[in-house]
Image: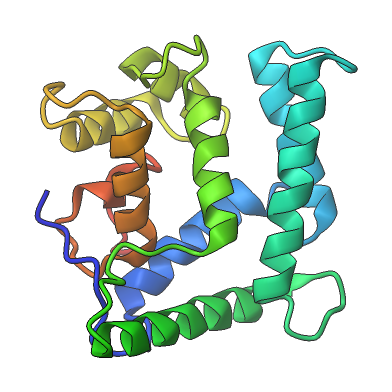
Amino acid sequence: MGGVLGFFKPELSEFQKKKLMHEFHTFFDLNKDGKLEWKDFDLARQRVCELSGWKVGTDKYMQTQEIFIEIWRKLQDDGDSNCDGVITTEEWIRMWESFNDECVKKTEKDVDAASLVPTWLEKYILYKFNLYDRTGDGVIDLEEYEYVLSDFGVPAKDARAAYLMFSENYNKKIDIEYFRILSAEYFRSNDPGALGNFITGKLTFDD
């Protein structure tokens, strides 16, 4: 994979900031008002239930609601620095810089913190995997990936090109274990060649 996950300094590079802001604006801030609130997560919950065909009152529907409430509460704990129920783009970036700083300190103590992610992100990664894995067979295939990303405005040709790269020419099975590795690379890596950079369907962060 060639992804360098660890940080040598807590500050985020411009490349890392662009990746984090792309995730913020595309997959988190669903009402496009430039900030994160519970209503963004409620919209995401509704979207995943609609895409998956889970009706109101079903077990899957209720489980999804519980997961999103948990993600939002943990994200608030980490990112809502002034406790106003809103996470701004500035707070979002500060949260990641603070997390990077913690990882640097752990690395200095000979703790392998290279692939660590915040606790709320573990739940979010599982949500994203289940969102893509529409058939529930434990593997994300190209058709599923392309279909879901189209709902977020990603062109089909970009989704196909991204999948080709991180699946290593379709030779790598995209199961939850590999998806976690790719996700850690996306959120943590400063290596432009890391395959995890492409899991959102965006092919370049030069803009």
Q: Residue at x 60, y 73 (%)?
A: 92
Q: Say whether residue 43 is visible.
A: no
Is 162 situated above or below 35? above
Quadrant of the snapshot with the C terminus: bottom left
Residue 27 rendering spot, x and y as whole percentages: 58, 47
Q: How is the image coloured?
A: rainbow
In this view, which residue lies farthest toward the front?
Answer: 110
Q: Residue at x 72, y 72 (%)?
A: 77
Nearer to the camera, 176 or 29: 176
Q: Residue at x 23, y 86 (%)?
A: 8
In the picture, residue 65 is in which quadrant? top right
1 to the left or right of 131: left
Nearer to the camera, 178 or 168: 178
Q: Residue at x 53, y 27 (%)?
A: 130
Residue 53 rendering spot, x and y as whole percentages: 71, 11
In the picture, residue 140 is in which quadrant? top left
